[in-house]
Structure formats: C-alpha cells, structure tokens
Image (cartoon, rainbow, N blue to C red):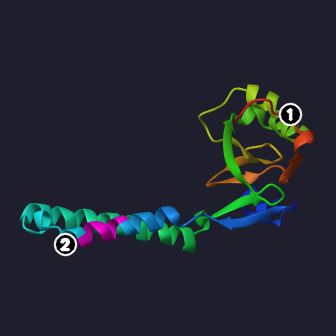
Amino acid sequence: MTTINNIDNTIFEINNIVKRRKSPVGAILWLIAGIAILVAKYNVEAISSSANLSSAAILMGSLVLIVGITKLVMVYASKSGVVPVYKPTGEKLERYEMFFDASLRDKISGLVDAGDFDKLLALPRSDSAAVLVVIYKTAGGDVLLAQVLEFVPHYHQPVTETLYFAKESYKLSSVL
C-alpha cells in the first residue's frame, strides 16, 4: 500500500506555490500600543496620580504588550506564520474545508478528480468529519488545489493525491 502525503505537507512542493511570512505589522502595532499605555502611565499626570487608573494602565499595557509579543512569536516562530502564495499572481491561497458523510466518499473522490466542484458543493454536508475535502484556492481562481481525506481513528488519512487545477480545468461557479 502506497502512502499518500497530506496536502498541508506537500503544498510548497508544487510548482509556483511559495512560502511567504505573514506581515508582522499587526503584532508591531500591538507592541507599540502596549508600550504607549505603559509610557502614559508614568507621563500623564491624571493617570499617575490616581491609584486605580495607574493600576489599570499597568494591567492594560501589560496585556496589550503580551498580545503583541505572542502575535510576533506566531509570525516568526510558528507554522501558522507561513502562508502559501501563488507566485505568478502573488495571491494568497485561502484554505477551505468541507465535511461529508462516509457513504459519499467514492462519489466525492470522483468529483474532485474530475474538477467538478459545482456538483461537489451541491452534495449534502455533514456534521461528522468522516470525509474531508481540503481546498486551497486563490481569490481570482487562477489555481485550485484539492485533496480528499477520510477519518481513521485520531486523524484524517488522504484518499487522493494533492490535485492541481488551473483556472480552465475545474468547474466552480460560486464562492466557497
């Protein structure tokens, strides 16, 4: 039995899909806001003269600073700080997940293999995680990557290889 790799593990091996780091601007703004609150605690007379406001400023400044540090660490040290980008257009690939009942697995695999995502979207969704379809797609629709996975105890096992579709080779008339 051959092992099929998960789409999340192979996405950056696909031609024209590159890694980009998320922008640290949001994290830096949180850091600046936290520092500004702490500086205001010492430099604004109304805050420093009131014990309650002074304590609140230290608490709020510290919390905002911690959020900024956490966001910065997530951007630079975690896997979630890396996003897939379609190199020719520079568009970020958005991830979509759809869950279906196990009885539809073969039909779902056939539709995904054929690139017929309109029919796939017409199938009834399920609250159970028996069959999972993972789709990565650019906003402009220039490229779509898809894979069918099925739940085996404790994780989703790939049923199909990661499939690559150019704009003209798949059918998807609505937004996911």
- In the rendered image, the quadrant that contains the N terminus is bottom right
Mark 2 neighbour class, 10 Å CA radius: few under 14, some 14 to 19, many 20 or more:
few
- Is residue 27 shown above or below 133? below
Q: Amino acid at mark 1?
A: Lys
| Residue 68 percent location from the top left of the image | 41, 67
Q: Is residue 6 visible?
A: no
**Which is nearer the eye, 64 or 106?**
64
| Real-space CA distance between mark 2 and mark 1, rounded to the nearest whole angstrom | 61 Å
Is 60 in the magenta?
no
Q: Earlier in the sequence, mark 2 or mark 1?
A: 2
**Which is nearer the eye, 5 or 30?**
30
Mark 1 neighbour class, 10 Å CA radius: few under 14, some 14 to 19, many 20 or more:
some
Q: Is residue 104 visible?
A: yes
What numbered label is drawn on residue 87?
Answer: none
Of helix, strand and loop, which one carries label 1? loop
| Residue 52 percent location from the top left of the image | 9, 61
Is 36 in the magenta?
yes
Magenta-colored segment: predominant secondary structure: helix
Image quarter of residue 108: top right
- Pointer 2 with pointer 1, Cβ within 8 A: no
For disc 2, the marked residue is 43
Image quarter of residue 90: bottom right
The residue under the point 64% across, 52% down is 153
The residue under the point 77% across, 65% down is 18
Of helix, strand and loop, which one carries label 2? helix
**Which is nearer the eye, 107 or 114?**
114
Between marks 2 and 1 in the image, the one whose residue lies nearer the viewer: 2
The magenta segment: 33-39
| Residue 134 percent location from the top left of the image | 72, 47
For disc 1, the marked residue is 171
